[in-house]
Amino acid sequence: FEENNERLLLRESSLDPADLGRWVRVRGHWPNLPGSNSSSMPIAISPPVSSRFPLVMEATRNDQSITKFGIEARRVLDRELSKCGTVLFRGLPVKSGEQFSEFVQALGYEPITLAGGGTARSQVAKYVRTASDEPHSHVIEPHQDMAHNPQHPLKLAFFMIQAPPADQPDAGGETILTNIRDLTEQMHRQGIIDEFEQKGGVLYQKTLWDLRQNPETSFSWQQRFFADNISQVEVTLRNLPKTIWHWDYKKNTLHYEHVLPATRPHYQTQESIFFNGIHTNHRDYFDLAPHIDTTLGSPYDTAFGNGSPIPTNLLDQIRGAWWQNSIALSLQPGDIAIVDN
């Protein structure tokens, strides 16, 4: 582990992949998980089975700055991330949100803040937010970040502060990773990608309310667009390709939609990959979530690009395929996972 006569700060781990996670029950286990009882849903998902998914890099020393670790981590990511999908860094001297921010900035990527996300989050430090402010009991389906949007991040960085209890196998808190290449192949085999192509792609329909008139909602345009007024929202909307919108000015409610393909080319390899929010943006996800008030209607919904509804059995197949191609990772405090989105 020497490069230019200098000892590297990171080395590939020799850990058994199975020790990185645990089996997690899925089918019929969570009443608020859409499609939970479908025959397409696996009974359980396993811990990692390959040393390349995720690739684990361990710190060889702890007497160097966070910035130096970030610079070396970037070299690893440039070489490996598009091949393995996720790189897990373990043993780095990162203990807080502020230190995580320092590490992320040292990676040298261009940070991005995107409006219109589907999950409530809170600011922790510069370029760092909570992964989700959903209730701890809520199961988040495997997905790609902002895949329902014309603009999306290329990479995601996750930092574990407090790990789920190791002695409580059903406590939850696992990080779910999905092999998107395998998922894409399965979607091709099942004819699902062809069906969406024939029907015009995926239509995303979204409604956001005015927080001043509906202070209890978590789906307001103020929260989702980081905006104080309608003019600020419209500046963002005008920069979103293929997006149309209108306002209900009596209630200051925003309705907007766009049609996107079910697949998109990978930004580096140019592979065509299954990349969308077909299942996570469908109304049944919100209707089943007990913490989301849908008395005013569902905030988001999906359909085929031509406007026809997506059958429940097709949604079940898609959700089942996501879980079938996923593993359950148990992150430890201090772990940093960089994910190719």
Image: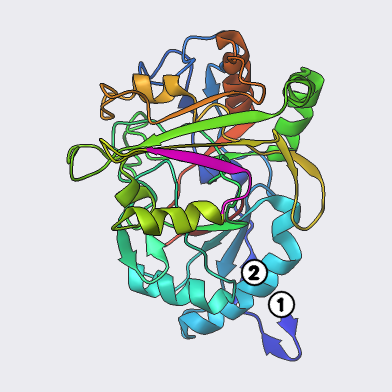
Residue denoted by label 2: 11
Tell which circle, 2 or 1, labels the residue nearer the N-terminal end: 1
| Distance from Cα at disc 2 to Cα at disc 1 | 7 Å
The magenta segment is 240-247
Label 2 packing within 10 angstroms: few (<14), some (14-19), many (20+): some
Residue denoted by label 1: 1
Please provide percent x and percent y for residue 67.
50, 82
Left or right of residue 175, residue 98 in this image: left
SS of the residue at dot 2?
strand
Q: Is residue 85 visible?
A: yes
- Above-or-below relation of 131 to 38: below
> Residue lying furthest bottom in this view?
5
The color scheme shown is rainbow
Label 1 packing within 10 angstroms: few (<14), some (14-19), many (20+): few
Please provide percent x and percent y for residue 184.
74, 32
Locate the N terminus and report the quarter of the image it occupies: bottom right
Tell me the amino acid under the disc marked 1.
Phe
Left or right of residue 190, residue 295 in this image: left
Residue drawn at point x = 28 percent, y = 29 percent: 292
Tell me the amino acid under the disc marked 2.
Arg
